[in-house]
Image (cartoon, rainbow, N blue to C red):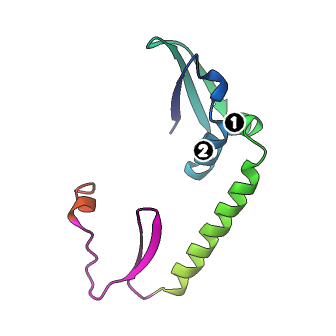
Amino acid sequence: MLELATHTKISANSTRFSEWYGQLLLSQTPNIYLGSHHVHTFTNIDKFTVSEVRSKADPQIDVALRKLRKLLDDILAFMLSRVGDQTVMICEQGVLSAYECSDSTIRFDASVDDFFP
């Protein structure tokens, strides 16, 4: 698996290493390939390892990742406390909610089902 990102030569100074670092960690992807282009023509493709991306990321990324880890630990603890219940978590318009299902079939609305035929 690999991650691919592109940017224009003009925006090269605003490369989003902090964003990519978190994404690479969560997806467990070892490398990202960054294609630079000018007027829709690629001029070069650079490969960065997770370590290289980390070294270029904002040092505050560690604070954000610790907060994310705490949140994920809290969600996991909550869901593990519900083992045996039919509980699902759904994020709607930025709000994460837990729902208990009353029967053995969990159904999402049609717009979600369309993504998973």
The kind of residue tagged 1 is Val
Quadrant in the picture for residue 45: top right
41 horizontally vs 56: left or right: left
Image quadrant where one finds the C terminus: bottom left
Q: Residue 44 lies in magenta, yes or no?
A: no
Residue denoted by label 1: 53
Which mark, by number, is residue 3? none
> What residue type is disc 2 on?
Leu
Alpha-carbon distance for marks 1 and 2? 9 Å
Label 2 Cα neighbours within 10 Å, binned few <14 / some 14-19 / many ≥20: some
Mark seen at residue 24: 2
In the figure, 96 relative to 50: above or below? below
For the residue labelled by badge 1, is the local secondary structure a helix, a strand or a loop? helix
> How far across and how far down the image is residue 114, in percent?
22, 56
Q: Identify the element where label 2 is drawn.
A: helix
Q: In this picture, is 88 found above or below 34? A: below
**Residue 94 location, x and y as percent?**
46, 62
Residues at circles 1 and 2 in contact by the CB criterion of under 8 Å: yes
Q: Residue, x 59% and y 22% (percent of image)? A: 11
Residue 53: x, y in percent?
69, 36
Residue 65 at x, y percent in the picture: 69, 56
**Residue 88 is one of the magenta-drawn residues:** yes
Q: Residue at 27% x, 69% y: name it.
A: 108
Residue range of the region highlighted in magenta in the rendering: 84-109
Left or right for 17, reference 98: right
